[in-house]
Amino acid sequence: MSLAGKKVVVVGGSSGIGLATAEQAKALGAEVVIASRSAEKLKAAADKIGAKGIVADATSDSSIVDLFKACGLVDHVVVTAAQLKSGPFKTVSMDDVRSTFEGKFWGAWRVARAADIRPGGSLTIVSGFLSLRPRPNSAIVSAANGALESLTRALALELAPVRVNCVSPGIIDTPIRAAMPEAARKEMLAKTAAGLPVQRVGEAEDIAMQIHAFIANPFASGAIVYIDGGGLVV
Ligand SMILES: NC(=O)c1ccc[n+]([C@@H]2O[C@H](COP(=O)([O-])OP(=O)(O)OC[C@H]3O[C@@H](n4cnc5c(N)ncnc54)[C@H](OP(=O)(O)O)[C@@H]3O)[C@@H](O)[C@H]2O)c1
């Protein structure tokens, strides 16, 4: 597949799955714009892959409108932006659960409204395995992921002929767990890997490959694909 002549915007493109997606898009010949909040992180990522970086915050209506005004008409948009704050259902603060939904769910909503995507182009949303396999202390993330999967189906109708799809990752080793103590992070990843049919956790590139499959396949719309190393069948 070639993306020569195509413009791809990745909101959340300065790290992890978004950065891997942007890097693959660049390698396929696309003009790539990455967006995130931290100007410093964004510059380092944009310089590394040869993309354009635009500072934008998915929790702000005006910031996302300004981002897509600056981008103009685009071919493919991917939203990976999220900062998750969860905790025990009865005690987690309402500020934390609201901010999780504000970034992850309303962020994708804002992007879908503001982006001017060419007919036949695509929007790819990223949810997560917790929608189907909840774990203790993460109800808000389960709910946001489930809502994004419903939103995907609704937008596949309403934004047609733009195609809208969603990838739901399992456990992927990205900077999203940078705040975890290193030993605990490694132990968690090793334990997860041992329990999966594929015997490893995911890499950002694994999810980026699925995002590019959605971008490339003109018959893909309203699809939700779980890329989790077989996590749903164990
Ligand atoms: N990694 C996993 O195990 C896993 C599993 C299931 C689902 N997911 C989902 O996959 C997506 C990507 O995760 P990841 O692991 O790639 O995370 P990551 O490495 O932490 O990257 C998140 C990116 O989003 C940006 N971002 C965060 N909040 C933002 C906001 N309000 N506005 C704009 N940009 C924002 C961050 O940059 P700035 O800090 O500069 O804003 C960063 O570029 C998330 O939706 C996550 O929930 C991940």
Image: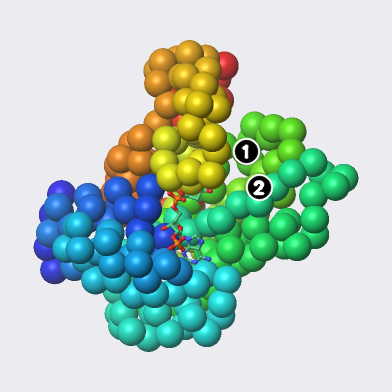
Residue 30, horizontal then vertical, whole percent: 17, 63
Any part of residue 8 in sight = no
Mark 2 sits near ligand 1, with its Cβ under 8 Å away: yes
Residue 69 at x, y percent in the picture: 37, 86
Q: Quadrant of residue 188?
A: top right
Local crowd size for mark 1, using a 10 Å CA cut-off: few (<14), some (14–19), many (≥20): many
The local secondary structure at tag 1 comes to: helix
User: For the residue marked with disc 1, what is the amino acid?
Assistant: Leu
Which x, y percent locates residue 61?
56, 80
**Residue in the picture at 70% in, 41% down:** 138
Which residue in the protein does label 2 denote? Answer: 141
Q: Circle 1 sits on which residue?
A: 130
Which three-letter amino acid code belongs to the residue tagged 2?
Val
**Mark 2 packing: few (<14 Cα in 10 Å), some, or many (20+)?**
many
Some atom of ligand 1 lies within 8 Å of the CB belonging to the residue at label 1: yes
> Is 133 left or right of 45, judged from the image as shown?
right
How is this picture coloured? rainbow
Which is nearer the N-term, disc 2 or disc 1? 1
**Quarter of the figure with the C terminus:** top right
What residue is drawn where x is 62% and y is 38%? 130
| Along the line of sight, the residue nearer the viewer: 222 or 28 | 28
Position of 6 relative to 48 (above/below): below
Position of residue 233 measured from the top left corner of the image (x, y, whole percent) = 55, 20
Q: What is the number of the mark on residue 55? A: none
**Left-right relation of 176 to 6:** right
Q: Is the Cβ of the residue at disc 2 closer than 8 Å to that at disc 1?
A: yes
Q: Which one is nearer the viewer's eye here, 99 or 69?
A: 99
Q: Which residue is drawn at 57% across and 71% down?
A: 59
Viewed as shown, does residue 187 lie left or right of 211?
right
